[in-house]
Image (cartoon, coloured by chain):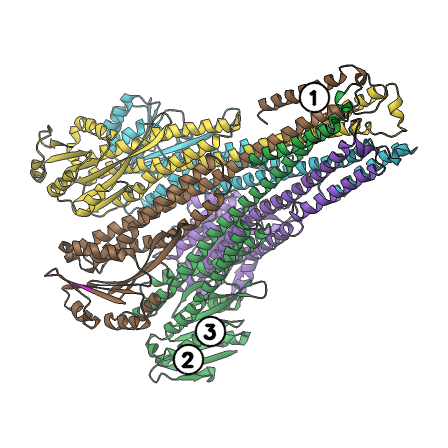
Chain colours: A yellow, B brown, C cyan, D green, E purple
Amino acid sequence: MITTTCLDSTTKKFTRDFPSADISDYCLSERNVVWADVSDPTSQDFIDLAEEFNFHPLSIEDCQKAHQRPKVEEYAGYYFIVLYEAELVGASDDLELRELNIFLGPNFLVTVHSRPIRAVETARRLWNEWTDRAEHGAGLLAYLLIDAIVDDYMPLLDILSDRMDDLEDAIFGEFKPDAIQEIFRVKKQLLYLRRSITPLRDVFNTMLRREQPIFARETHVYFQDVFDHIIRVADTIDTLRDMLGSTMDAYLSVSGNRMNVVMKRLTSIATILMSVTLISSVYGMNFNFMPELHWKYGYIFALTSMLVVGVGLYFYLRKAKWL
Amino acid sequence: MITTTCLDSTTKKFTRDFPSADISDYCLSERNVVWADVSDPTSQDFIDLAEEFNFHPLSIEDCQKAHQRPKVEEYAGYYFIVLYEAELVGASDDLELRELNIFLGPNFLVTVHSRPIRAVETARRLWNEWTDRAEHGAGLLAYLLIDAIVDDYMPLLDILSDRMDDLEDAIFGEFKPDAIQEIFRVKKQLLYLRRSITPLRDVFNTMLRREQPIFARETHVYFQDVFDHIIRVADTIDTLRDMLGSTMDAYLSVSGNRMNVVMKRLTSIATILMSVTLISSVYGMNFNFMPELHWKYGYIFALTSMLVVGVGLYFYLRKAKWL
Amino acid sequence: MITTTCLDSTTKKFTRDFPSADISDYCLSERNVVWADVSDPTSQDFIDLAEEFNFHPLSIEDCQKAHQRPKVEEYAGYYFIVLYEAELVGASDDLELRELNIFLGPNFLVTVHSRPIRAVETARRLWNEWTDRAEHGAGLLAYLLIDAIVDDYMPLLDILSDRMDDLEDAIFGEFKPDAIQEIFRVKKQLLYLRRSITPLRDVFNTMLRREQPIFARETHVYFQDVFDHIIRVADTIDTLRDMLGSTMDAYLSVSGNRMNVVMKRLTSIATILMSVTLISSVYGMNFNFMPELHWKYGYIFALTSMLVVGVGLYFYLRKAKWL
Amino acid sequence: MITTTCLDSTTKKFTRDFPSADISDYCLSERNVVWADVSDPTSQDFIDLAEEFNFHPLSIEDCQKAHQRPKVEEYAGYYFIVLYEAELVGASDDLELRELNIFLGPNFLVTVHSRPIRAVETARRLWNEWTDRAEHGAGLLAYLLIDAIVDDYMPLLDILSDRMDDLEDAIFGEFKPDAIQEIFRVKKQLLYLRRSITPLRDVFNTMLRREQPIFARETHVYFQDVFDHIIRVADTIDTLRDMLGSTMDAYLSVSGNRMNVVMKRLTSIATILMSVTLISSVYGMNFNFMPELHWKYGYIFALTSMLVVGVGLYFYLRKAKWL
Amino acid sequence: MITTTCLDSTTKKFTRDFPSADISDYCLSERNVVWADVSDPTSQDFIDLAEEFNFHPLSIEDCQKAHQRPKVEEYAGYYFIVLYEAELVGASDDLELRELNIFLGPNFLVTVHSRPIRAVETARRLWNEWTDRAEHGAGLLAYLLIDAIVDDYMPLLDILSDRMDDLEDAIFGEFKPDAIQEIFRVKKQLLYLRRSITPLRDVFNTMLRREQPIFARETHVYFQDVFDHIIRVADTIDTLRDMLGSTMDAYLSVSGNRMNVVMKRLTSIATILMSVTLISSVYGMNFNFMPELHWKYGYIFALTSMLVVGVGLYFYLRKAKWL
């Protein structure tokens, strides 16, 4: 389904849902900005797009194939951009990455996505409010859209950061062996997030350093801002990864320490029991001449020595911190 | 065996298997694109090639020696490219890397390989279909061929990714100690795949940034596309390697945890048994004056205390999560 | 609250707290340097700033949102700089990072912060003393401020370095298992410090290599000095991180060694006790014909052999360094 | 000892061992290529070389001091190159690195080495054969020499690769604890090999990108070929290092697993023995009223229960995979 | 204390310790090279230096503050260089780093240090010998000084390398658990050495690539030589760090293996003792009808079975390599 919105740069009025056949005429006039949002596209939609805007077959093919890597590619007269919107969904907070393809020209923006993208709504709302900056053309619109996507990464990373604090409590507080599985899960989510944002860092960097940009210098400051946000997200991801590595190390170390304490304790108890058993075993021998056996208080004596040896060892090992 | 195909740029017709002696004349006319595919080459084939196309002796030597590293080298008037096609073969999914040498000039393409390459068939089929883009010359043909090879890496990486999911189940589900051997095997395969694709990333990057390219700017967009696919494959490999590292860590950690649980449990049982044995050992002593021995229910009393101590310890250790 | 101070470059006198409406006139005269320090800013303050100095909306927005990453951004006629002052506060030496936003033009400096910044006071004091270098304009003032912030990192890193020496003692001296938690805490603090200083390294580097700087070459030498201090801080952080990694390894290794010693010792003791018990167990057998049982010194003989075996094993294991 | 060979570029004849006093005259004529090979040099040899070819004192000093790092330095009119020939020698395959110093001018090559270098012989043989490419001057000769050295790294790396396969068998097959020592040894050899080849990668790269090369563009293609081989060797070393890291991880993991299996098994056996002993210990008690003791088949009953408990536990633990 | 030496470039004579007031006149004449060595400087010394040579206040401040990072900074007309001389001192071979500040102009060199620097003496001696190369001005003097410092790192690294060989013996030979502490110590020393040399690598690289150097091209070859030595030192440090990492891994692995062997052995012995004790425990039961008890050779039979079981198990476990 193609939803087309057009902003007349002089009157600053919006026109919606006119027949797509008129798009290129509007674009040619160069005073208007056209946004064609294609959700859940059909094969025919792609053919229409290619014809109307004269897109290169390769960019249309990339757009049709899902699971592209995030990128910014330059074609004659427009940029082809692939981005991913990230969200934690469901009861178990699974990470969902939704692909958004953008064709960005000086005065048109075409967005293609098979699933609903929240950032599209955010951008539409802000575009209606920011008509006073209409002179930036489609560049501003692209800024609003990309920035909405990139900014949505931050609260998500805050959630992961909170979860890592919980993990830390689960390690240094009452140790939970299952924490490892959760560490592994967060690690994987960070890996996917990183993969969907870091390639953009390099391409935006290249794009901003270009000699002859498609957009004016004044619009550039907006892309610089997006670039800065991308770096911030990428940096935060790297910091979280680094901290998760430390959390993993801490997990292993605390896990090892706890095992050590348990084993030392159990083996110490075994030692005490064996020592005490040795005494009883001695008096279980069947020699004819064993004076203690015939003492009146021999039994009491034996039990007492067993108690003395047991308690003595207990305090000795306690002092040596083995128990 | 040399199979030669020629595409007449004006008539857009193909001619096949004409005598190789005519190749250079066709090339000189500059309106035609010639593809000479040399499979399982003989020494004479190499001499013929060098003479016909005037290739530099060093590139012919590289072509003759097997096991080159993937690369793109520039010689006067042509590129010499080494690529590897990857496939998982056999019942045990062994990784097979098949070398393909390409000589790429503005209007000729020479492919040399000792084993059958699937991508050669794919490229031949697409070339027959895409005659409408014949103005790109041999560049388009090279694009079809290289892209077919690079794209074949993706399904292979999907298989490895699935296998890593299985490994994860084998670790967090019912733990299998043998998983380590499989982790090691996938790691090795990723290492070989990485080695056969990442060098291309750097050389394509250099090639695309050249001042005076052999091919026109319009054809460049196709190489840009291949470059993008190479990056995607290389990124995916790096992500998989990263995840495999985490899988390895998880394996070690879960393996350690399981060992801890078993050792704690066994040592706890030993402690219980020793405590109970201690009681029986006490009543095995031979003192004359041991009142319990003469009690009517002495034996029952002893057995009961043994049971009480045993069961009591069992629940105590259970509560302490040592058992 | 906005505190405005103005230095007249010719008379080298300071004027304070004049109505903010006069700021731009002062700036226009180009002989004066104006410093507007905005602490705990209100929404109205931001609107005033944007109007008075004609700041770009994006930099004002960045300034309003807290938790920006450290950065230097260039806008038309001024730099927008985000920095963090670091301090260890409270009884448990928690790391506090206080954000400082700076707008830096050729002859004005605007500082915005929601919490008191010590470096602001330091810079104000030095500015009053250094009136003889007034020809450097706002650049010198920015130098004083940023240098005060960056220099404050060093004593903080010295504290962390001392704490790491303590950790080392806690590992190689009398081993303390809790050291792991402290290692983890220092690691996290280093991570946060690193994150608040290293981005500056790259941007200052870029800024210093610019073709057309806002400030004169003579003022540049001051920024070069700040840059050098930033590198020194970043290097020290990296060195501390590296050493902390070694400390972690040492912790794990010493912890493992100690566990080994304890386990070897306990298991050795168990072996001795079992050997001795075996002897007593032998003489607890009820065979009719056991000559030793009827010897006069049988009991003494048994006890002596138990002692001999026990002491013998003790010295044997001691020699083998298992005990 | 100085061995001098001269190739007359026009007649393509070789002259040998003429008095060294004539060298510079030959060089001045610019039609000839002179190769002076200095093996086991004396102090006088160095003085002669410096005088004859007018070498800079610093390069002569570097040449006299052994254990330089591999490098390519440019002096006025010549390159000074340091390389290492690698060989595995002796019964225990110790790695031997033999230093070769090269002074390379447009029409002279001076090689200095204190130990015999195999590549010198290889280069001499090929030089005699390749007289048809004499127009490349000393550059071709340098190519032959350096390529012979670099190519000799590959079979050596193949040997190390085979050894790593053996190590893998020694880990996953019948586990050998001593494998760690061999892993360590191969790691060290790879470290030395890497150190003697990777610095060349960077310097050749710089040399090939120079604006005004000493050698013509046609000769450059040969250096490009050497560069490619160096990269291939360096890549292979990096891959082997990476795989050795995995081998080390596998060793540790398998070693840990095996220990786990042994400990679980031994502790399980101990548990069984203790359970059985408990029964016999119960019937060793001396209570007056113990009915079982007076049963006719009491003893058989006791032995049977011991057997039942023992075998029962055995199968139980077997099923739980602890035994 | 300031020691001033002056070399007249034409007469090649040295003048010493003339009043410092004359320095700038000598320098202005441009035919002389002046070296002012300031050891253990007072505040007045710094004021004198700044006045006499017109140094920038920032470089004087850097010079006054100790613990700068190694660096080369360019000021108008001179370089400011900070270096560290390294030495192992005392019985326990502690690493001592002594700071040396250098102001280097075309025909003057000012060295400032608070502790005696050996390299200053070495450079002074060589300067007296190398008067024939006086045309290089202060550049040659700086070369002699810096090279003396950098070269002193190599024997120190050789000592550390020897110590690592000893560590290797202490691991693979007779295992010494304390080796970990020594590994940690060498690691720290390498870290400090690295930190005091690697920053120079980057700055010398930048300095050598400058467009308009302070020194002539001929003098550059000397700085190139120092640069090469710095790289060699830095490479060696990196190699040693890499090897120390392997040594650490080997330590952990061998330590683990040894523990495994001991634990297996002790637990095996325990198993044997328990089996034997079981037999004696059986014959300690008090059943009325136990035929063996009444056999004449029952006791011998029991002892023999105990011996058979014990020895049998011993050889079985020995064969299984658990003992």
Residue hosting label 1: B306
For the residues carrying marks 3 and 1, which lies nearer the camera in this image?
1
State the residue position of label 2: D24
Q: Residues within 10 Å of mark 3 (few under 14, many from 20)?
A: some
Tell me, yes or no, if residue A221 can be seen here.
Answer: no
In the displayed structure, D46 sits above or below A242; it is below
Locate residue C257: give its quadrant: top right
Alpha-carbon neighbours of circle 1 within 10 Å: few (<14), some, or many (≥20)?
A: many
Indicate whether B22 appears above or below D211.
below
What residue lies at 49% left-to-right and 26% top-to-bottom?
A169
Location of residue C300 in the rendering, given as x and y in whole percent from the top left corner: 88, 33
Asked if the stretch drawn in magenta spans residue B6, the answer is: yes
Residue E309 figure quarter: top right
Chain letter behind tag 1: B
Would you say the residues marked 3 and 2 are in contact, meaning their CB atoms lie under 8 Å apart?
A: no
Check disc 3 and report the residue beneath it: D120
The total number of labels drawn is: 3
Regarding residue E253, the answer to whether it shows in the image is yes
State which chain disc 3 sits on: D
Mark 3 belongs to which amino acid? Answer: Val
